[in-house]
Image: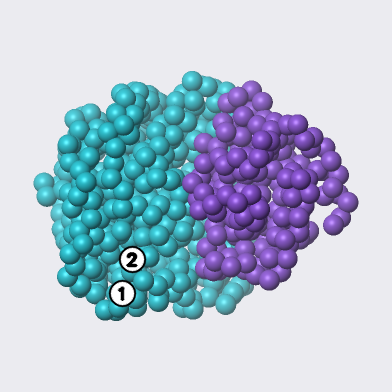
């Protein structure tokens, strides 16, 4: 694992409330990377994985909540504003060089002509405007290779998802 | 000779998608502008071989923006395939869930997506021309908009049990009865939601009065209009016949959704993966039509709820009773529909049968084929299934809202580009108007393409005399 990933996580202290916000379509192959990560986290905590689809906040432990949806939407801004820290989890395409990337985010609204493109930075910007503050936030993204109609991950993305799960376990759940 | 090509391509998580290309001539005028959809999907193939009762759970996964619409259209197709009409309570509950989807989707579009353009202005700084800028300009309104969205989502959750991946509607009915507690919780917020929507209408009317010149030259063109109607041609979003009216508002057809293939065909262009539906009798492109809020309000005679109908009368009077052709009035129509949906929620909740326990018709008379139609927020959504006797789906055809509006979106982009780009200098405000032409239709492209193995993507760049100077082709 490249050291830059750890450096980002070291700044996350264990006494702050954290939200893991995963999004993507589990039926679009690797677009569902976050879903597969949450399945693993839920299994470890013996939480019914069906709850992933509630689109509601699920308490993973005393400090960490998770939420999943197909897409990031503007109305989540006020939820995001309730937390000290948020890690958005998503798949990415070839436009991002790294296969697994954790990057700190700034509140920055990004314009889009379509309803269904809402970036985590835009979410933070709305949170900041609505609540007067945005949480410290990161985007953990996993390279996707296959985005067809398939409920399974490609082999390469599955390997990356395993790495991402290990990373989350070590830093947040243990 | 084409000297400059401007491309507006949204950043997407999934490669492909759509873009606008504006071809300009040597003297800085727009030669032609296209709205391309170069996303390649195969959802219909994905569904083949699945069981028909699974389809209402599978099809919402096409798209995370309007999953409820796909869920309900699929269940309606399943009702017909299985020959199992839902009991009245189930129909009321499906309708209620659908109104929740309309309210949250329309609310998000107006207040969070289109609102910044209207309230802050097309020429305002891009850095502030967004929902964040809107919050700073009118924080109270922004918070109310969030409340409207949540109201719609809460309806979906209270009716269906969860906000995404609904498993509520099934062929023949629904699997969950409703409670008086949920009914009362929704009812107590109705008045506030009406007030918020009326505030949105007030904003739009004020803006329209000040920007009439823009509205009257911004993508104004003639088409037919299509949408579901009640038997007396009132606005209907859940069930009814499909009504198609001409550019003058005269009824061309009124037909059962199961007969859609008798009236609608799809044209293919080599520059878009998304097909172009049209009215068969008039051919392409004379028979193109618009759907969605503007299309629906142009296809009806009245609205059956009082407040929305009063607003509809004002809307209809803007063009002396004829259809409204102005693309920017999609926003006005969207707000009128939001008002209707909130009023409709109250009508549904005041119906004693909404709390009934007869929610599933277990009697079946297998038909093997069926078409489910619903008015999704963006327009008419058709699910057509052919099913084997063992319940396995053999063939699927989906015509989604964005598909119906494909021609109109491309025409709107071309019209706006030609109207506002008059020289080589292209300012941000001009480009935003092009985007706004698309945005008015509220397209959702992630569910709107389905041409498996039929068509490569071709981009031709032509000079002013029509000579091909470059061809890009992607198989």
Foreground residue among B443 and B241: B241
Does residue B189 appear anywhere in the picture? yes
Residue B135 x %, y %: 55, 26
Residue B460 x %, y %: 56, 70
Q: Quadrant of the C terminus of chain A?
A: top right
User: What residue would you read off at disc 2?
Assistant: B53
**What SS does tag 1 mark?**
loop
Colour-to-chain, cyan: B
Q: With respect to residue B67, does A121 lie above or below?
A: above
Q: With respect to residue B239, does B128 lie above or below?
A: above
Chain A rendering hue: purple
**What SS does tag 2 mark?**
helix
Foreground residue among B241 and A75: A75
Distance from the alpha carbon under mark 2 to that under mark 1 = 8 Å
Foreground residue among A32 and B29: A32
Q: Is residue A148 left or right of residue B101?
A: right
């Amino acid at each position: 694992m490249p050291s830059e990933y750890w450096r980002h996580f070291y700044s996350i202290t264990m006494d702050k409330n954290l939200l893991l916000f995963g999004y993507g379509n589990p039926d679009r192959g690797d677009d569902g990377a976050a879903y597969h990560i949450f399945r693993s986290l839920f299994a470890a905590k013996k939480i019914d994985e069906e709850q992933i689809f509630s689109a509601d906040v699920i308490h993973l432990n005393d400090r960490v909540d998770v939420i999943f949806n197909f897409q990031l939407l503007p109305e989540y801004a006020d939820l995001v504003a309730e937390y000290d820290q948020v890690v958005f989890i998503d798949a990415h395409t070839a436009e991002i060089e790294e296969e697994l990337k954790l990057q700190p985010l700034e509140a920055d609204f990004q314009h889009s002509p379509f309803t269904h493109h809402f970036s985590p930075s835009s979410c933070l910007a709305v949170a900041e405007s609505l609540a007067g503050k945005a949480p410290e936030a990161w985007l953990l993204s996993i390279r996707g290779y296959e985005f067809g109609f398939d409920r399974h991950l490609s082999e390469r993305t599955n390997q990356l998802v395993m790495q991402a799960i290990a990373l989350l376990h070590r830093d947040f759940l243990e | 000779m084409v000297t400059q090509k401007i491309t507006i391509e949204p950043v997407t998580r999934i490669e492909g998608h759509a873009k606008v290309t504006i071809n300009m001539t040597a003297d800085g005028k727009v030669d032609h502008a296209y709205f391309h959809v170069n996303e390649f999907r195969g959802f219909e193939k994905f569904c083949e071989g699945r069981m028909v009762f699974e389809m209402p759970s599978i099809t919402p996964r096409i798209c995370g923006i309007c999953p409820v619409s796909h869920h309900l259209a699929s269940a309606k197709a399943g009702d017909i395939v299985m020959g199992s009409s839902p009991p009245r309570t189930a129909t009321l509950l499906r309708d209620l869930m659908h109104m929740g989807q309309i309210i949250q989707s329309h609310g998000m579009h107006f207040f969070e997506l289109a609102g910044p353009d209207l309230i802050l202005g097309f020429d305002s700084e891009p850095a502030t021309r967004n929902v964040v800028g809107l919050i700073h300009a009118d924080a109270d309104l922004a918070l109310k908009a969030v409340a409207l969205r949540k109201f719609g989502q809460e309806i979906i959750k209270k009716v269906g049990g969860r906000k995404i991946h609904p498993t509520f509607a099934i062929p023949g009915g629904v699997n969950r009865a409703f409670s008086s507690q949920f009914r009362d919780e929704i009812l107590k917020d109705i008045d506030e939601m009406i007030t918020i929507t009326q505030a949105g209408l007030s904003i739009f009317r004020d803006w329209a009065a000040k920007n009439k010149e823009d509205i009257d030259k911004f993508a104004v063109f003639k088409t037919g209009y299509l949408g579901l109607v009640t038997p007396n041609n009132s606005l209907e979003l859940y069930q009814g016949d499909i009504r198609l009216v001409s550019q003058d508002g005269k009824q061309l057809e009124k037909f059962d959704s199961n007969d859609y293939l008798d009236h609608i065909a799809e044209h293919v262009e080599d520059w878009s993966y998304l097909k172009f539906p049209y009215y068969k009798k008039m051919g392409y492109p004379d028979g193109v039509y618009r759907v969605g809020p503007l299309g629906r309000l142009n296809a009806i005679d009245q609205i059956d709820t009082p407040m929305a109908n009063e607003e509809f009368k004002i809307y209809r009077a803007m063009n002396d009773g004829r259809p409204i052709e102005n693309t920017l009035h999609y926003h006005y129509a969207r707000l009128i529909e939001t008002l209707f949906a909130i009023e409709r929620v109250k009508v549904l909740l005041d119906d004693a049968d909404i709390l009934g326990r007869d929610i599933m018709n277990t009697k079946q008379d297998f038909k093997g084929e069926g078409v489910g139609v619903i008015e999704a927020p963006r327009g008419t959504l058709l699910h057509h299934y052919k099913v084997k006797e063992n319940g396995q789906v053999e063939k699927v055809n989906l015509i989604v809202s964005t598909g119906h509006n494909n021609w109109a979106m491309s025409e709107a982009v071309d019209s706006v580009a030609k109207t506002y780009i008059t020289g080589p200098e292209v300012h941000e405000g001009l480009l935003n108007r092009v985007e706004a032409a698309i945005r008015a239709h509220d397209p959702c492209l992630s569910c709107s393409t389905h041409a498996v193995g039929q068509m490569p993507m071709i981009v031709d760049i032509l000079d002013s005399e029509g000579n091909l100077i470059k061809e890009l082709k992607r198989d």
